[in-house]
Amino acid sequence: MKSFRIRKIHTVRELSFHSTINSIQKWLDKKRKKKKKIILIPTMGNLHQGHLDLINSYKKRNTETIVSIFVNPMQFNLHEDFDAYPRTLESDLQTLQTSSATSVFAPNVREMYPFGVRAQIDIPKISSILCGASRPGHFQGVATVVAKLFNIIKPDVAIFGKKDYQQLQIIRIMANDLLMPIKIVGVETTREISGLALSSRNDYLLPNEKLIAPSLYGSLLAIRTGLLNKKNIQKTLEKEREKLRDLGFKIDYLEIRNASDLTATPFNSKRIIMVAAVLGKARLIDNIIVET
Ligand code: PAF
């Protein structure tokens, strides 16, 4: 086990670092003996303020907050570049020093998939729509690696961002239906002042694209206003799609769904407006929830 000393204003504490299952489990055993509650925030690294907000969202006494950093090959499909995904462990560890994380679990691929992929978790229906339709196999990869992380860490609470709302709902269904005794918490999306949702993928935007990208959130707000004012919502959706296309977005989807299971009909009172669109080299997603 490596440990990184973290200097806080009045105290010095240790951020324990583990790259093997054996090492993190030994550390967890000690913490559980001290009756600590275990909080897990799964990430693929390349950490930004949005991750820090997830990590810092659950600051309670007597907790240990573990951040996992693992770029999961199983959730990349053939057209996506697993090798090009940014690996920034050193700077991630620096970033974590400003957070409430107490431990980092950063295994390599052999540690997580010693036998390759012989078993997988599939949450059908919800995994095949929206982002799942254009990224086949992606959510099976996400559910499988999150289930493995849950089995390794056995957290009391696991925290995910609402920006990846479809992922969050899939994990909620998995934990609920497979009787995993873990509280799944969704945390609000952190945005730039422009409204752009923070994402590692924003790094792929060129300076002029960075100026256009906040229009995605602008469209979500316009559709929300349309919904609340009971305007012809199909017309509003089409108008916003058109606007985004004119700005150079390639729209994957811009839709209104039920917030619980992401079905299209019949609508209930808690709905979500969801968008996925490509701008330059970045595939951006965002959403807002509307209660009517
Ligand atoms: O949201 C992510 O970063 C990933 O999909 C997750 C949940 C860490 C699984 O690899």
Image (tube, rainbow, N blue to C red):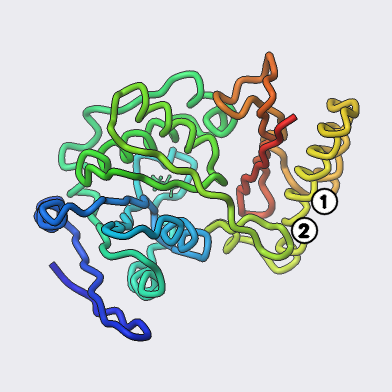
Whether residue 194 is situated above or below residue 251 in the rendered picture: below
Whether residue 194 is situated above or below residue 168 in the rendered picture: below
Q: What residue is shown at x 74% (from left), y 48% (from top)?
A: 216
Could you tell me the amino acid type at mark 2? Answer: Ile
Left or right: residue 135 compared with residue 230: left
Left or right: residue 211 compared with residue 67: right
SS for dot 1:
helix
Residue 177 placement: quadrant: top left
Question: Observer-nearest residue: 12 or 193?
Answer: 12
Whole-percent x and y of residue 251?
72, 39
Mark 1: few, some, or many residues within 10 Å (few <14, many ≥20)? Answer: some
Whole-percent x and y of residue 276?
65, 41
Residue 236 placement: quadrant: top right
Q: Mark 1 — residue?
A: 247
Could you tell me the amino acid type at mark 1? Answer: Leu
Q: What residue is shown at x 24% (from left), y 79% (from top)?
A: 5
Whole-percent x and y of residue 231?
90, 29
Q: What residue is shown at x 55% (from left), y 39% (from top)?
A: 165
State how far apart marks 1 and 2 are (Cα).
Answer: 7 Å
Q: Mark 2 — residue?
A: 212
Question: Observer-nearest residue: 62 or 217?
Answer: 62
Q: What residue is shown at x 41% (from left), y 23% (from top)?
A: 123
Left or right: residue 180 compared with residue 9: left
